[in-house]
Image (cartoon, rainbow, N blue to C red):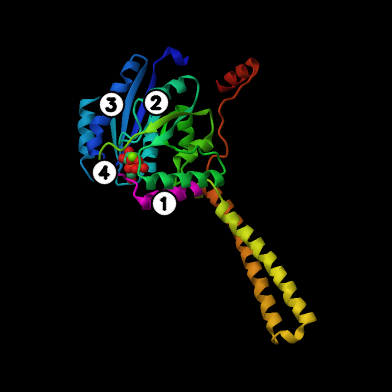
Amino acid sequence: MHQNAQRRRITFLFPIYNEEENIALLHSTVDHVIEPLADRYDFDFLYVDDGSRDGSLATLTELAERDARVTVIELARNFGHQLAVTAGLDLADADAVIIMDSDLQDPPRVALELIERWEQGYDVVYAQRRSRQDSAFKKLTAGVFYQVLRKLASVDIPKNTGDFRLIDRKVVDELRKYRERDRFLRGLVAYIGFKQTAVLFDRDKRHAGVTGYPLRKMLRFAADGILGFSVAPLRMITRLGHLISLLSFVGILYVAGVKLFAPETAVPGWAFMTIAMFFLGGIQIVMLGVLGSYVGRTYSQVQNRPLYGVASVRTGTLAAAETGSAAR
Ligand code: UDP
Ligand code: MG
């Protein structure tokens, strides 16, 4: 059972969407980088073809024929990056999985640092961008997104961090229990806990091909992050309701004042109409807020996340012996 006694297995997980021109270089670079570690670990490569429309699948099939460490999963259609990674995590069978983009934006040599930190006892080692070579637009939108997410999210999701990371088997097993559809993996990993740490790196340019994340997908992804980890938008309704009710109350006092002290300035029926309008407006938004709080609870119930995760159980020797005999 002693971990050091046996070789540990590490799987590289690559989501692939139209990466025909990157696959060969990606594979050879990663292979080259891990060569010095080959005597200590068993490595394998899991390529998930996410319904590519170019020759990616053919290239991958060829690669698998040449290299026995390669497994290729062909998804039935394009399900999106997050689901492609999920499919890989569901099928991986290793002591640790390293998730990496396939366009060489995540420099393979950083994987060595991830493994080093893992050996120091961390369960999740995420690669955090010190700098990135992307368009000004992408940098700006990403910056705003992480800012907003940090403000709103109920868990501490590290900023400037993609899915490039090493995840220990324990955390992969935990992650598999999370079956929500609209997933924001980096949020889920943060939510799960265990011992996590960061390694800083400089993100490169995409080697070849075009981004699989056009603006439409990026917005959707941002919404998944915010809506998946925060009910702040719903809480805003309640706050707004209270604010409007307060204003309505002031309005009602004003109308009543006019009616009592300066009735000649008011049109007949005005007081009734205005008070009714203020009153209803306030009540309606407060009630929307009440509905919102139930919707929020229903939402988190429907997400059906595990209630907690256990990192370890420590007992005395006596209790351990008892559990042992009970198990038999
Ligand atoms: N990807 C995927 N399915 C998609 C879009 C992207 O599997 O629908 C993969 C893609 O092949 C790459 C990773 O997800 O390995 C990140 O995508 P990309 O580089 O296009 O995103 P960007 O770096 O521009 O944000
Ligand atoms: Mg990229």
Secondary structure found at label 1: helix
Predominant secondary structure in magenta? Answer: helix
Q: Report the side of 119 relative to 62 (left or right).
A: right
Q: What type is the residue that disc 2 sits on?
A: Ala
Secondary structure found at label 3: helix
Dot in front, 2 or 1: 1
The picture places residue 103, in percent across and down from the top left corner, at 30, 36
Q: Earlier in the sequence, mark 3 or mark 4?
A: 3
The picture places residue 58, in percent across and down from the top left corner, at 20, 37
Q: Which residues are magenta?
A: 210-226
Mark 4 vs ligand 1: CB below 8 Å: yes
Q: Earlier in the sequence, mark 4 or mark 2?
A: 4
Question: Is disc 3 in contact with disc 2, using a CB cutoff of under 8 Å?
Answer: no
Q: Report the side of 264 relative to 196 (left or right).
A: right
Q: CA distance from mark 3 to mark 2?
A: 21 Å
The residue depicted at 80 percent of the width and 80 percent of the height is 261
Q: CA distance from mark 3 to mark 4?
A: 22 Å
Residue under numbered circle 1:
219
- Judging depth in this view, the residue of 278 and 66 nearest the camera is 278
Q: CA distance from mark 2 to mark 1?
A: 33 Å
Q: Report the side of 229 relative to 251 (left or right).
A: left
Dot in front, 3 or 4: 3
Q: What type is the residue that disc 3 sits on?
A: Thr
Residue 104, quarter of the rendered image? top left
Question: Residue pushed farthest front?
Answer: 136
Question: Residue pushed farthest top?
Answer: 5
The label number, if any, that marks residue 29 in the structure image: 3
Q: Is residue 249 visible?
A: yes
Residue under numbered circle 4:
52
